[in-house]
Amino acid sequence: MLIKFHVTNYHSIKDECIFSMEAYTRDRKNLNAICTPDKNTPLLLSAAIFGPNASGKTTIISSLNFLKNLVKTSGNFSINSDIEDQSFAFTDEKSPTEISIEFLNDGRYIYSISIFDGKIHKEYLCCDNKLIFDRDANNIQFGSVAKKEINKLEFVWSLTNPNSLFLSKCSQSNINIIKKAYEWISEKIIYVDNENRLNVELLLKTLETRKSEIIDMLTVADLGISDITLQETDIQARLNRATSEVTYQKLKSDLGLQKYSMGHDLILDDEKKTYYLDMKLESKGTVAMIGLAPEWIYALETGSLLVVDEFESSLHPLLVDHLLNLISDPVTNPRGAQIIFTTHDALIPKRNDLRRDQIWFTARNPNVGKTVLYSLLDYDVRSDLEFTNNYLNGRFGAIPMIKNRRRLNDQNKTS
């Protein structure tokens, strides 16, 4: 489970931002929102980030996806390629992009990376307060690793490029304490992009093994869908005719929306009949829910971390609440799956009885264009505070400052 993460110098983030899933134990409200995987670490199952457009909500959570992708792929980077610059743009100063994450996976891990000038500047891993490795540019120090594994790690280190994470290179080393860190970051961070809710590969895989569970979720959601089938088409042959990687990916994406048909049960003249509709003809909300269903099933089954951008996009509020309930209910979530989501729906805290430690805000400093992250716990407010009106009235900031166009024009004329 995620404990917390730190991000510095990443996109709109200039100064360090710290996001925590640690529960504020003095708050006794809605204890169902807390999971205690060990006696010393009560953790939140869900947390929401509020803020105006362009304030950095997506930036905060996308840093986790950036870390995940770098861990998964950097081991295969060419020695001549640089890591793409992710640093804060509105400054002439050059400094490293830094991400640190703390999580539980049969041990309490801290993993941190620092990227500078397209290369790995620093990299660090510890478990239960014991150093596993500490990398500083072209040097590495090993800590609590069995002596018989040191030779293996030194060999892996000799193959590690300046632009590759050592953790990525170690993914096949079969050293359990390192493997568990790699697996949690690469497999248990599930990022759901608002622009593309449908993960075609995951949907196909889940349909092969868990189709009935997807249909059950869609039935509960009252979408009128009783079946999902693949259309009869030679998809692989078309993909094989792709002449480039770009064409391949485009075909794959296009086919992903065309190869599924949704079954709808109708009763005509007292006779039940199933009609199939191409997915591209379904509503955006239906496609969004179909896309989220495999993510939820996987997260609940594996105890993963769902990271969802603009959670309520195209979804009815009751569907949003239903998905959150699946996370908060110990019956449906016995493995401690978590969710962090961005949202503009100020009623979600009221409908889901969110605690103060579950509510976060982002704001943009207009003078330097940087993102600021803070928690409702930073305010001296009661645990039973009515959130919606107080937030929309600007008590906690993190709302757009809508300018009066006529007044703005008058100011421009007089200036």
Image: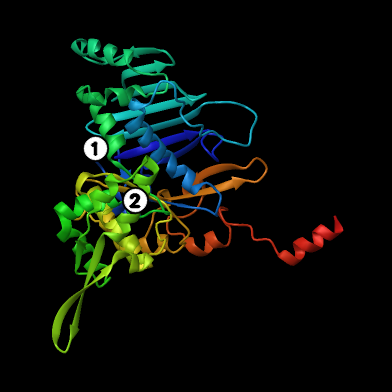
Q: Is residue 41 above or below residue 272?
A: above
Task: State the image quarter where residue 163 is shown.
Answer: top left
Q: CA distance from mark 2 to mark 1?
A: 47 Å
Q: Amino acid at mark 2?
A: Leu
Task: State the image quarter where residue 75 is shown.
Answer: top left
Residue sitting nearer the eye, 105 or 190: 190
Which labelled disc corresponds to residue 251?
2
Q: Position of residue 139 (x, y in %)?
A: 40, 11
Q: Position of residue 347 (x, y in %)?
A: 44, 64
Q: Is residue 289 above or below residue 125?
A: below
Q: How many marks?
A: 2
Q: Amino acid at mark 1?
A: Asp
Dot 2: few (<14), some (14–19), or many (≥20) neighbours within 10 Å?
some
Residue sitting nearer the eye, 290 or 104: 290
Q: Is residue 107 above or below residue 413?
A: above
Q: Position of residue 318 (x, y in %)?
A: 34, 67
Residue sitting nearer the eye, 371 or 24: 371
Q: Is residue 316 above or below residue 250?
A: below
Name the residue tied to disc 1: 38
Image quarter hosting the N terminus: top left
Residue drawn at the location 37% of the way across and 22% of the way down: 124
Mark 2–mark 1 CB contact (< 8 Å)? no
